[in-house]
Image (cartoon, rainbow, N blue to C red):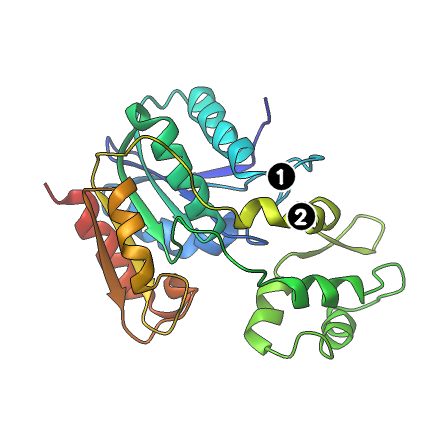
Amino acid sequence: MLQLNYKKYGQSNTKLIILHGFLGSLDNWHTLATEWAKNDIEVYTIDQRNHGKSPHTEHHTIDLMVEDVKDFMEQQGITKTNMMGHSMGGKVAMQFALTYPELLDKLIVVDIAPRSYNHGHDDIFNAIHHVSLETTQTRKEVEEAMMPYLGDFGTRQFIMKGLERSDDGKYHWKFNVETLDRDYENVLEQTFSDKQFLGDVLFLKGSLSLYIQEKDFAEIKKLFPNSRIQTIENAGHWLHADKPQQFFDAVKIFLFSN
């Protein structure tokens, strides 16, 4: 049983566990978690395996992360919770809901559908592999090494959040590059279940993102019959960062609605 790194915000009977996306960490959710905690929501942000300060493991699959979250709930004495996941975290949250529906009240899925996806991180891994952390002295040097392979400034900044300096002065990636690169296919797989989750589900999508499309609606309704899809305008895949106020309001209204 893994001991996942986590942070708890506030205290309330309304609980929310937040699962970050691929190559992210619990730090991505600090600002919003702080605000929800001020609004009578007890928030747990966790680093999933091979991310942030949680243990690095040899394998990385959605099913393993589902069991990690179940173990985390037992460790914290949480018998029932609301759950929100973004991207990879959304895949974990959907599979968790279908596997352990008795442990969930409401589910929020952020910009991901239950279908399988094509590779979208190959350029990121290529850029990371072209960085020599043994010889790098500054963060600027790391970014400059990635630039020819990863042209998008925002994506580079996101990946750079995973860079940390060790006690010996050398840089290292907080995420487990080797395992995540090798097991990447496991994160892209379709969400399968012969059961449904009958609780309330909110799918939040960015209007500028293609991760949730009209072709996904039927499969979403099949697995989650009490679901609805809400679009946040002028937001991309990281809609919680692009439009934090609209995102904050949508989650709060959903959690407290009957």
Task: Give, as a three-letter code, the residue at label 1.
Answer: His
Instruction: Tell me residue 73's x, y (percent).
Output: 42, 25
Q: Which residue: 88% across, 59% down?
A: 134
Question: Which amino acid, mark 2?
Answer: Leu
Which residue is farthest right? 135
Left or right: 171 with respect to 72?
Answer: right
The residue labelled by disc 2 is: 180
Front in this rendered view, residue 176 or 98: 98
Q: Residue 27: in sight, yes or no?
A: yes
> Residue 148's x, y, as percent?
74, 79
Q: Which residue is mark 1?
A: 60
Q: Are marks 1 and 2 in contact (CB under 8 Å)?
A: yes
Q: Is residue 226 above or below residue 130?
A: above
Position of 97 with respect to 66 (left or right) is left
Name the residue nearer the viewer: 58 or 1: 58
Secondary structure under tag 1 reads loop
